[in-house]
Image (cartoon, rainbow, N blue to C red):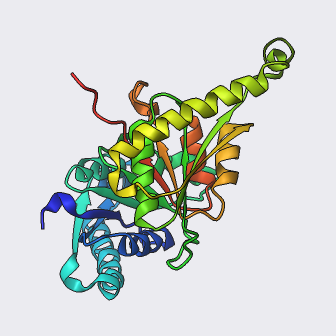
Amino acid sequence: MSEHHRILVAIDGGEGGRAAIRYAAARRDGSDLWLVHVVDLAVATGVFYPYGYAGLADEVREAGETVLDRSEKLAAELVGADHVTTTLRDGGVVAELVHAAADARMVVLGDERRHGLSRLVTGSVTGRVASRAPVPVVVVPTVWSPGQDAHRVVVGIADLDASVELVAHALGEAADRGGELVLVHAWELPAVFYDTTLEHDQAAWEADARHRLMQTLDRARHLAPHAVGTEAWIQIRQGQPAQVVADESKGADLLVIGRRGHAFPLRRLGGTGHALLRESSCPVEVVPPAPEAP
């Protein structure tokens, strides 16, 4: 099997990594699992501990190998030892995972429900990997477990007219689960604009948005012929986008969102996407923008 068909599972040594393994094993569709653990020796031996003894780097690597060994045993129980490989990498966690993602078809990570000083010091690994990886990235809540299928996939739509590939991808996910797809578009304007802009035109605007999403859905079906029989529903909601999409995806099998095609590189996911990675109660798949035609 080509190495590009495998699923990269980021291992952190905690429950997040175990949840990622369980999700990847359940959704692998014949793919091998590639478990990757990254140790940042610069941090462990030089930045926060400048006076560490010479053997600290070796101990950090040994701890990383132990983490991988334990994770490999769990994965082997789920998919068989012949379908599991492991790699220990040195370097920055985000940079190494993004680089490794080029040799996989998908990346799966456990979520990070960290607060306070921990997030301020280390930042969000999941958000930064999802913002930069060249392949889809799935972030799995630590509370997720197989067997919770609701046969429903939700896709959050920001751009009504430029989301055909995203909807086609979500249709495929719904078809693979034998379920339905819900397209959700949320809109919000500052209150100062309500009286002058939307007081009399809200219904007409929502009808237009629904019509445009129906056109997007029709075009997406041509890109996902295997999902021709998959039912799809459109929801137009007023409210804060992250909150609306999170509410609509409660109890879903998967939430699919896209990255912005034109944005400053470090913010390609956007604030709404980062919020959903933190707050979603179901796995979230971040799909990179489709390559632009010449």
Foreground residue, 271 or 105? 105
Say left or right for 205 vs 195.
left
* Residue 197: image location, x then y, percent: 78, 14
Say left or right for 240 vs 255.
right
Foreground residue, 166 or 208? 208
* Residue 174: image location, x then y, percent: 46, 60
Residue 27's place in the image compared with 172, above or below, is: below
> Residue sitting at 40 percent across and 75 percent down?
26
In which quadrant of the rendered view does residue 221 lie? Answer: top left
Tell me if residue 47 can be seen: yes
In which quadrant of the rendered view does residue 52 lie? Answer: bottom left
Foreground residue, 225 or 190? 225
> Residue sitting at 66 percent across and 37 percent down?
186
Residue 62's place in the image compared with 159, above or below, is: below
Say left or right for 292 vs 209.
left
| Identity of the residue furthest to the top in this view | 196
Q: Quadrant of the N terminus?
A: bottom left
Q: Quadrant of the C terminus?
A: top left
Foreground residue, 25 or 156? 156
Say left or right for 268 vs 100.
right
Residue 201's place in the image compared with 278, above or below, is: above
| Identity of the residue furthest to the front in this view | 229
* Residue 201: image location, x then y, percent: 78, 19
* Residue 61: image location, x then y, percent: 27, 68
